[in-house]
Amino acid sequence: MSNLLNRRNWLKNTTLATGATAFLGKSVLSDVNWRASSPSPSMNFWEWELVRKRTFPELKARLLANENPYGPSPKAKEVIKDAVSLGNRYGHEDAAILIEMLAEKEGVTKDHIMLGPGSSDLLEKVAISRFMTDGNIVSADPAYMSLIKTAKAMQAEWRPIPLKSDYSHDLEAMEAAIDSKTKLVYICNPNNPTGTITAGNKLSDFCNRVSERVPIFIDEAYLEFMNPADKMSMI
Ligand SMILES: Cc1ncc(COP(=O)(O)O)c(C=O)c1O
């Protein structure tokens, strides 16, 4: 690879995406109605901010958000600072290089990789493309709601399956909930908001069997944080 991806160019694109999000958040602030004083996990980010400002002291760690309480590393800050001067350039070539690197790392072809500015964007795109016409989505309850909320906004029916008593996925009940109108099964492993793990071998059996009938989306946003013994990607 002659034109190596460097972190400076990569972070440049991330910075641009963050700028867009901040702009959107600001424009909707005026529409927010005050809710009860305790924050709920289903609140949007701008609502959390308003509630926090009104009710809570300055917090180092907001445990209802998956944030790094220590802030960006000094090295990352340095790279972001450098990247600002390249903010006038599109990052398509860097994206193409990153796709090649990821495909090689995961042992798949390039057409299996889709990039996004964070995974929420990709979760929502999957929901929009799967649920253009009616259908249902099967997932655990509770689960991370971004994809599910978008599916519901597309008029999909959500079939929530309660987690088991150890907070793992009830794979048997999820399979039983699938019917001819099911267009996606969504599984988050480790799960959010419980942080619990569904055993990799059970999940892989489930995927091998059930994906013959319906696509399964495994959200592995937190896979890197797992103990090596538990870590098993479904890719
Ligand atoms: C399971 C899971 N998937 C995806 C996301 C979205 O992450 P991102 O910040 O990359 O959009 C989150 C964020 O909390 C999450 O918990």
Image (tube, grey):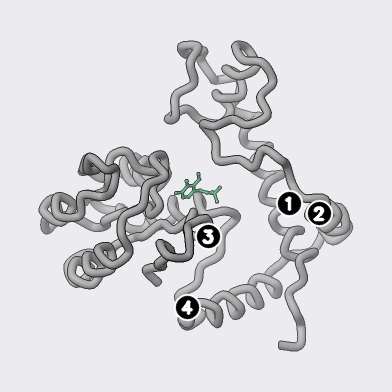
Residue 24: where, in percent of width, then height?
A: 62, 36
| Residue linked to disc 1 | 15
Secondary structure type for disc 2: helix
Sooner in the amino-acid sequence: mark 1 or mark 4: 1
Q: Are marks 4 and 2 in contact (CB under 8 Å)?
A: no
**Nearer to the camera, 85 or 31:** 85
- In three-dimensional space, the C-alpha distance between marks 4 and 2, rounded to whole angstroms, equals 29 Å
Residue 208: where, in percent of width, then height?
A: 23, 72
Sooner in the amino-acid sequence: mark 2 or mark 3: 2
- In three-dimensional space, the C-alpha distance between marks 3 and 1, rounded to whole angstroms, equals 23 Å
- In three-dimensional space, the C-alpha distance between marks 2 and 3, rounded to whole angstroms, equals 23 Å
Sooner in the amino-acid sequence: mark 3 or mark 1: 1
The residue depicted at 47 percent of the width and 13 percent of the height is 35
Secondary structure type for disc 1: helix
Secondary structure type for disc 4: helix
Q: Residues within 10 Å of mark 2 (few under 14, many from 20)?
A: many
